[in-house]
Amino acid sequence: MSDTLMNTYGRLPVAFEKGEGARLWDSEGKEYLDALSGIAVCGLGHAHPAVTQALCEQAGKLVHTSNLYGIPNQQALADRLTSLSGMDRVFFSNSGAEANEAAIKLARLYGHNKGITNPTIIVTNGSFHGRTMATLTATGNRKVQAGFEPLVQGFARVDYNDLDGIRNVASNNHNVVAVMVEPVTGEGGIAIPDEDYLTGIREICDEHGWLMMLDEIQTGMGRTGEMFAFQHSNVIPDVMTLAKGLGNGVPIGACVARGDAAEVLQPGKHGSTFGGNPLVCAVALAVVNTLEQDKLVARAAELGQRMLDGFSVRLADVDAVNEFRGQGLMLGIELDRPCGELVGTALEQGLLINVTADSVVRLLPPLILSDQQADTIVEKVSDLIREFVTA
Ligand SMILES: *Cc1c(COP(=O)(O)O)cnc(C)c1O
């Protein structure tokens, strides 16, 4: 391997050349089944015709102008995202971390506008919000932060799924302006909170005039079996961030806001050169249209249930499995031991999976999976786990 790339990733010994749906082929022509979707990005799978068409048509017309001008595709995408979410306004970025940066800046400015000069945002342990300075500070994982001190000020941390923790901060800290959480943790190990968690956060935020901010970068765009994960509950956030599945692989993020929060960022307060350009917005529009036309959100719910049921049958007698859990096609199988090496073993057998939080096998397959492909993933992963824990 060449050493001209910074050594930021421990890469697996494979490079893919071509994809179609949930399948990939490497440079030797070996075929793989993709149960990761480039970490929840390619929800429509690889080389989806609607994505390819949108890319090619828009590339032949206009790729970039500037946010100094009107961008009809950006406006159309904002219209779709707001009507799907029931929210009001969108700012487009190029990544998840940047969408969260916009949310963090929005919350701080919201605080300053109310006379709070040291605004604090409540975040949780076990969260992941990105790798920029503010988002790595918000992230609840020391490994992500270590070596990058001094961190950014203005965050207070509580446990995930702990409403009392949030209430405690409320009674001690009068600088709080927002709570920012993931509806289901992604990098943190597919933790699914209690049913009343989001409703509880909504109540606390309403009581104190705080913004409820949901990081839906991994959970959004149908992944959990609703277009946005908050739609499993009957609350609506003030701010929601999106990225991964929104562009099916083209770099796009979004910070969506509602009510007062939607009016906070005014000219001169935030911006992006590339954000929301005609090309990425054409692709994201094709993604949204395809999710709707092909009813892929309901399909994600159905496939997720099918896979969870499959695992509960196939792994019922394996004591080393602590728990399998999931919402839609965001699935985690927690073992009683670190299992990172499963990723390499699966790869050898032509299957792409991921392990996060040391001991959680994480599956994020594309929403276009066939029943048969879903069953194959369940069989292969179950066999791999069984072999691994009995070896
Ligand atoms: C991936 C992810 C991010 C960061 O997105 P990038 O595009 O890598 O900056 C933030 N939050 C969550 C929940 C994520 O899964």
Image (cartoon, helix red, strand yellow):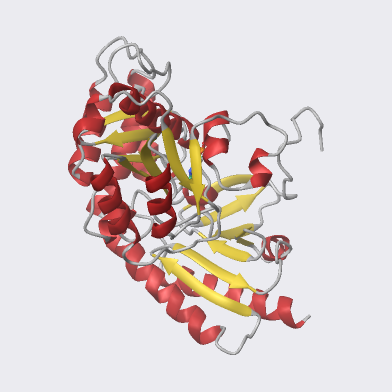
The location of residue 26, given as percent across then percent down, is 65, 50
- Residue located 53% across and 70% down the image: 377
How many numbered markers are drawn? 0
Q: Is residue 115 left or right of residue 36?
A: left
**Where, quadrant-wise, is the N terminus in this rendering?**
top right
The location of residue 272, given as percent across then percent down, is 41, 18
Q: Of all residues shown, which one is farthest toward the bottom? A: 317
- Residue located 35% across and 34% down the image: 255
The location of residue 22, given as percent across then percent down, is 49, 57
Q: Nearer the viewer, residue 204 or 335?
A: 204
Q: Of all residues shown, which one is farthest toward the front? A: 172
The location of residue 144, given as percent across then percent down, is 64, 42
Q: Nearer the viewer, residue 6 or 210?
A: 210
Residue 56 appears in the rendering: no
Q: Nearer the viewer, residue 59 or 10?
A: 10
Residue 114, picture quadrant: top left
Q: Is residue 280 left or right of residue 360?
A: left
Residue 304, picture quadrant: bottom left
- Residue located 24% across and 46% down the image: 206
Residue 248, picture quadrant: top left
Question: Is 97 drawn above or below residue 71 in the view shown?
Answer: below
Question: Is 129 drawn above or below residue 329 in the view shown?
Answer: above
**Where, quadrant-wise, is the C terminus in this rendering?**
bottom right
Residue 153 appears in the rendering: yes
